[in-house]
Image (cartoon, rainbow, N blue to C red):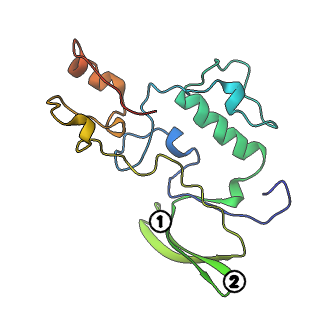
């Protein structure tokens, strides 16, 4: 949008750009574990106008993806177009304009403020991994007596190595 000269603003409730690639140990936030690599080769995931650095492997690690996304924002001077610490609480169309209610946290001042952003156009990009899919009650797991761990719980793989050693592990999902 910025490249086309359209005045735009990105709202992100996270503290930094990168979405789930911005690894955190905070389980209230969706994030990849510290052992994650992309499932697609870098040639399929890079932007045409911003290739991956040569030293990155065929399947980039989570921290490489995060650094690349931050570099993208810097390279294209998008920092001022992204409002971090900003959670969208509601969206509605009023008199032909989108009204986006936002709660913006100020970590330094430890307070939050309510904002209303109005726009003629709206792009929603929540990502496919924003809501956790709890499989414990899934019919396919009926009769399963083992432990079910959601991938969102696994932030540092080293912490689970002993727990999972010599056990059969099944991964359900993409």
Q: Position of residue 59 (x, y in %)?
A: 60, 21
Location of the N terminus (image quadrant): bottom right
- How packed mark 2 is, by other alpha carbons closer than 10 Å (few <14, some 14-19, many 20 or more), is few
Side of 136 where 73 appears, left or right: right
Q: Position of residue 72 (x, y in %)?
A: 72, 41
- Among the two numbered marks 1 and 2 on one chain, the one whose residue lies closer to the N terminus: 2
Q: Are marks 1 and 2 in contact (CB under 8 Å)?
A: no
Does residue 30 lie above or below 148 as drawn?
below
SS of the residue at dot 1? Answer: strand
Side of 69 where 166 appears, left or right: left
Q: Residue at the spot x=85%, y=61% of the render?
A: 5
Q: Residue at the spot x=19%, y=31% of the render?
A: 147
SS of the residue at dot 2? Answer: loop
Query: Mark 1 or mark 2, which is nearer to you?
Result: 2
Q: Residue at the spot x=51%, y=60% of the render?
A: 85
User: Depth check: 29 or 83 in front?
Assistant: 29
User: Depth check: 122 or 73 in front?
Assistant: 122
Q: Position of residue 99 (x, y in %)?
A: 60, 78
> On the image, numbered disc 2 is attached to which residue?
96
Does residue 140 lie above or below 168 as drawn?
below
Q: Which mark is residue 105?
A: 1
Q: Residue at the spot x=64%, y=18% of the render?
A: 58
Tally of numbered discs: 2
- How packed mark 1 is, by other alpha carbons closer than 10 Å (few <14, some 14-19, many 20 or more), is some
Q: Position of residue 74 (x, y in %)?
A: 72, 45
Side of 2 where 39 appears, left or right: left
Side of 125 where 133 appears, left or right: left
- Rounded to the nearest angstrom, the CA distance separating label 1 from label 2 is 28 Å
Does residue 112 lie above or below 3 as drawn?
below
């Amino acid at each position: 949008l910025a490249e086309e000269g359209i005045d735009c603003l990105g709202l992100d409730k996270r503290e930094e750009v990168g979405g789930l690639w911005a690894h955190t140990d905070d389980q209230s936030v969706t994030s990849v574990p510290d052992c994650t690599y992309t499932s697609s080769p870098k040639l399929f995931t890079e932007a045409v106008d911003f290739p991956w650095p040569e030293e990155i492997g065929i399947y980039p690690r989570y921290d490489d993806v995060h650094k690349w996304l931050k570099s993208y924002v810097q390279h294209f001077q998008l920092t001022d177009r992204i409002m971090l610490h900003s959670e969208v609480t509601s969206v509605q169309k009023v008199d032909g304009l989108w009204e986006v209610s936002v709660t913006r946290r100020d970590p330094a001042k430890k307070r939050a403020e309510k904002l209303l952003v109005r726009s003629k156009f709206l792009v929603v990009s929540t990502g496919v991994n924003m809501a956790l899919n709890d499989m414990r009650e899934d019919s396919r797991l009926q009769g399963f007596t083992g432990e079910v761990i959601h991938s969102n719980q696994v932030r540092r793989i080293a912490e689970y190595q002993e727990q999972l050693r010599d056990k059969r592990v099944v991964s359900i999902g993409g």
